[in-house]
């Protein structure tokens, strides 16, 4: 008999979203729209338990694969221009200047961009 384990606990990274309550609340509101909420590969999603606690609908959430050719900033720009997302969640590795540029672009395309500060990574 074979057992398939979909979660590798040794490689699981826990990201602290405690200081991101307003962002999670915003995602809860945006998750009711009929568009995607896209997470860049550099910005891992919060736990399912946290999504459930804030009533975030997970039906329209996608974590994008890393790009071999585009940086995170360019991925966010491309996602905004696709007009398929109500929100794009990226890491704060994007420069402050580019964050401002991307936020203005998102407004123009009726989308929202959230930049999440990653605190500490814990591996177990």
Image (spheres, rainbow, N blue to C red):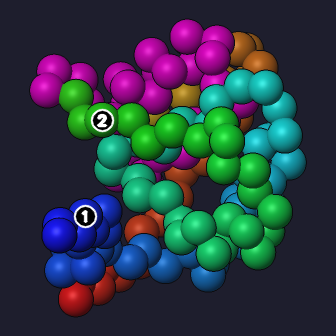
Q: Residue at x 61, y 81 (%)?
A: 18
Identify the mark at residue 65; answer none if there is no mark: 2
Horizontal and vertical percent for residue 44? 41, 58
Horizontal and vertical percent for residue 88? 57, 37
Location of the C terminus (image quadrant): bottom left
Q: Is residue 90 above or below residue 70?
A: below
Q: Is residue 101 above or below residue 16?
A: above
Q: Is residue 75 above or below residue 20?
A: above
Location of the N terminus (image quadrant): bottom left
Residue 41, image quadrant: top left
Q: Is residue 114 above or below residue 45?
A: above
Determine whether, in the image, residue 1 is placed left or right of residue 42.
left
Question: Most extreme residue toward the front, as rendered?
Answer: 1
Q: Are marks 2 and 1 in contact (CB under 8 Å)?
A: no
Determine whether, in the image, residue 121 is placed left or right of residue 68.
right
Element class at badge 2: loop
Estimate how packed mark 1 is, as few (under 14), some (14 to 19) or many (20 or more) residues with alpha carbons within 10 Å: few
Which residue in the protein does label 1 denote?
A: 4
Q: State the CA–CA distance, disc 2 to disc 1.
A: 23 Å
Q: Which residues are magenta?
A: 68-95
Q: Residue at x 59, y 41 (%)?
A: 61
Q: Is residue 47 visible?
A: yes
Question: Which numbered disc, 2 or 1, marks the residue that appears first in the sequence?
Answer: 1
Q: Is residue 96 visible?
A: no
Magenta highlight on residue 93: yes
Horizontal and vertical percent for residue 62? 51, 38
Magenta highlight on residue 2: no
Question: Most extreme residue toward the left, as rendered?
Answer: 68
Element class at badge 1: loop
Q: Nearer the viewer, residue 81 or 66?
A: 66
Determine whether, in the image, residue 57 is placed left or right of residue 88.
right
């Amino acid at each position: 008999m074979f057992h398939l384990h979909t979660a590798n606990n040794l490689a699981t990274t826990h990201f602290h979203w405690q200081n991101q309550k307003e962002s999670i609340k915003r995602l809860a509101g945006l998750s009711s729209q009929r568009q995607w909420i896209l997470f860049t590969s550099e910005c891992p999603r919060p736990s399912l338990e946290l999504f459930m606690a804030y009533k975030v609908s997970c039906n329209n959430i996608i974590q994008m694969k890393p790009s071999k050719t585009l940086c995170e900033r360019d991925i966010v720009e491309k996602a905004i221009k696709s007009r398929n997302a109500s929100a794009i969640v990226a890491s704060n590795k994007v420069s402050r200047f580019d964050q401002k540029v991307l936020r203005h672009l998102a407004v123009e395309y009726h989308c929202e961009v959230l930049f999440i500060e990653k605190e500490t990574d814990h591996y177990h």
